[in-house]
Image (spheres, grey):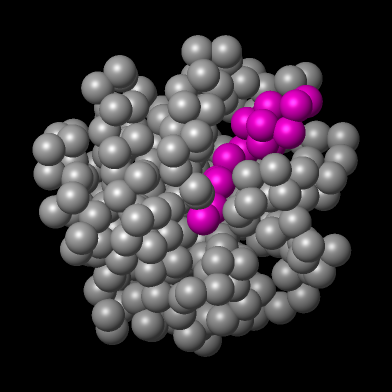
Amino acid sequence: MNLSLLETIRETNPVVFTVANSVTIAEVANAVNAIGASPIMSKAKEEAADLVGIAGAIALNLGTWTPDQIDQMVTVGSLANQHQRPVVIDPVAVGLPSRRQQFDRLVATTQPTVIRANAGEMAALSGDLSNSKGIDATGAVADPKRIVQAVALHYHCVAVMTGAVDWISDGQQTVSLHVGTPLFATHVGSGDMLSSVLAAYLAVEPNAMTAAVTGTAIFGATGQWAVNQAKLTLRQPGSFGIALMDSFSQVTAETLSSYLKDKVVDE
């Protein structure tokens, strides 16, 4: 983990190009902007080459896919690979057959750098459909380490499985993160925000495992810090959304270091 990446993003302002979930597009753009990166969204396949050219990293979110958007993602992903731009794929509700079909089409032409998913989605990608419901997950899987390693190895990427405990693996090294707040689960869009935020970390850190661990840990710790600063309860998901956005622009490595002490565990 490298907490200095927090300031590197603010200093270098990398462009993060997201093909977005229309439900959360504004929140994702605001989150990327609040951490110090520069968000850009597009629905036009015709400008894919221009946007990939200026982007530091790309996030592809299947949350509200349409046939035209999948065509765009295939084009964007292929160009990103050609230009050696990191790619984060967020396979929302991939346990559903229709969505798995679109995900499979995308990864047939795009090599992801990171796949970011919740427990149910990651379990579905590993072949275990028992825990996949849609955008939500039951919050636990029987063997999270095995599942996240299996996805990382199969797709030759870093797999980030988020939940009460976050699990990150490149197939060889696996890390668990014990930081965050239950309010993330009450706020629709938290996962989408993280996927594009991780793209910002990949834009400034060539080691994908370091970028994924650092970005996920800082995201979780920022949520926890926001709850403590605003003295929020679990019945305040709306207030949490505002506090979280403010906190993205306020936190420093120093303020978060105590939240992360002993919370990153090599498995």
Q: Position of residue 120 (x, y in %)?
A: 67, 30
* The one of 162 and 258 positioned closer to us in this rendering: 162
Magenta run includes residue 122:
yes
Q: Residue at x 70, y 43 (%)?
A: 154
* The one of 90 and 163 positioned closer to us in this rendering: 90
Q: Position of residue 240 (x, y in %)?
A: 43, 48
In the rendered view, does 15 fall on the left or right side of 99?
left
Figure check: 23 above or below 160: above
Q: Which residues are magenta?
A: 113-128
In the rendered view, does 54 fall on the left or right side of 208?
left
- Residue 218 visible at all: no
- Residue 105 visible at all: yes
Quadrant (top left, top right, bottom left, bottom right) of the N terminus? bottom right
Quadrant (top left, top right, bottom left, bottom right) of the C terminus? bottom right
Q: Position of residue 90 (x, y in %)?
A: 48, 40
In the rendered view, does 229 fall on the left or right side of 264?
left
Q: Residue at x 68, y 49 (%)?
A: 152
Q: Quadrant of residue 16?
A: bottom left
Magenta run includes residue 15:
no
Q: Residue at x 33, y 36 (%)?
A: 73
Q: Quadrant of residue 60?
A: top left
* The one of 173 and 4 positioned closer to us in this rendering: 173
